[in-house]
Image (spheres, rainbow, N blue to C red):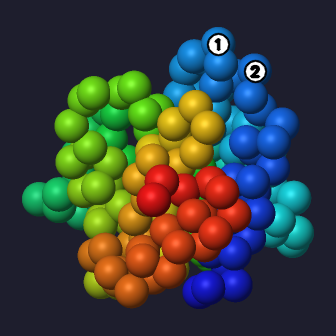
Amino acid sequence: MQAELDKVVDAIREFYARETYLLEKDLGERALTHRLAVHLERQFPGWDVDCDYNRLGERVLRMPTGSIVSTDDELGKSVFPDIVVHRRAVPENLLAVEVRKGINHQPVEHDRHKLRGLTDPHLWFAWQIGVFLILGKRQVTLSDVYVGGRIDQALSAWFAARLKDTGLGAG
């Protein structure tokens, strides 16, 4: 999983090198996630990279009834991951990324619940890795890595250290 997370670090490095205008002008999270997805796509050849993707093969992405994330709307507030790295037709789900701007003062629990659900190994469509990022204007101010439906403390610490080592993480 470190190899995949290294690719995420490389994409974030490219994002911060090339997308300063978006950050300086305080554009919306969807604009930021789209541009980060473009940089992720370059790191994951052979994989599909999509934003707000709500399908699993031919099926609409729905969490089981009673799960921690609601799926009864089409407003992009529930189970639409911000960015996914996957294979559309199979489906094979590698990476789900939730992104927030540093100035977003809404509680982060919705994004965290979503990543717990999306990486839950008891669900047939679970993503192997989930990444939560809070993007500041010059660096990532917070990051977590989810595996198996929970925050993986060791991988989160490793990922944060990699971001810090490349000048992209708070320290």
- Please tell me how crowded label 1 is: few (under 14), some (14-19), or many (20+) other residues with Cα within 10 Å: few
Position of residue 9 relative to residue 27, above or below, is below
Residue for badge 1: 25
Quadrant position of residue 150: bottom left
Whether residue 42 appears in this view of the structure is yes
Q: Is residue 122 left or right of residue 87?
A: left
Q: Answer whether labels 1 and 2 touch (C-beta < 8 Å).
A: yes
Q: Nearer the viewer, residue 15 or 131?
A: 15
**Helix, strand or loop for disc 1:** loop
**Helix, strand or loop for disc 2:** helix
For the residue marked with disc 2, what is the amino acid?
Tyr
Q: Is residue 165 left or right of residue 149?
A: right
Residue name at image x 17 percent, y 57 percent: 68
Residue name at image x 25 percent, y 56 percent: 113
Counting from the top left corner in percent of width and height, residue 139 is at: 58, 45
Q: Identify the disc placed on residue 21.
A: 2
Quadrant position of residue 148: bottom left
For the residue marked with disc 1, what is the amino acid?
Lys
Q: Is residue 144 left or right of residue 3?
A: left
Position of residue 135 relative to residue 14, above or below, is above
Quadrant in which the N terminus is drawn: bottom right
Counting from the top left corner in percent of width and height, residue 11 is at: 75, 57
- Please tell me how crowded label 2 is: few (under 14), some (14-19), or many (20+) other residues with Cα within 10 Å: few
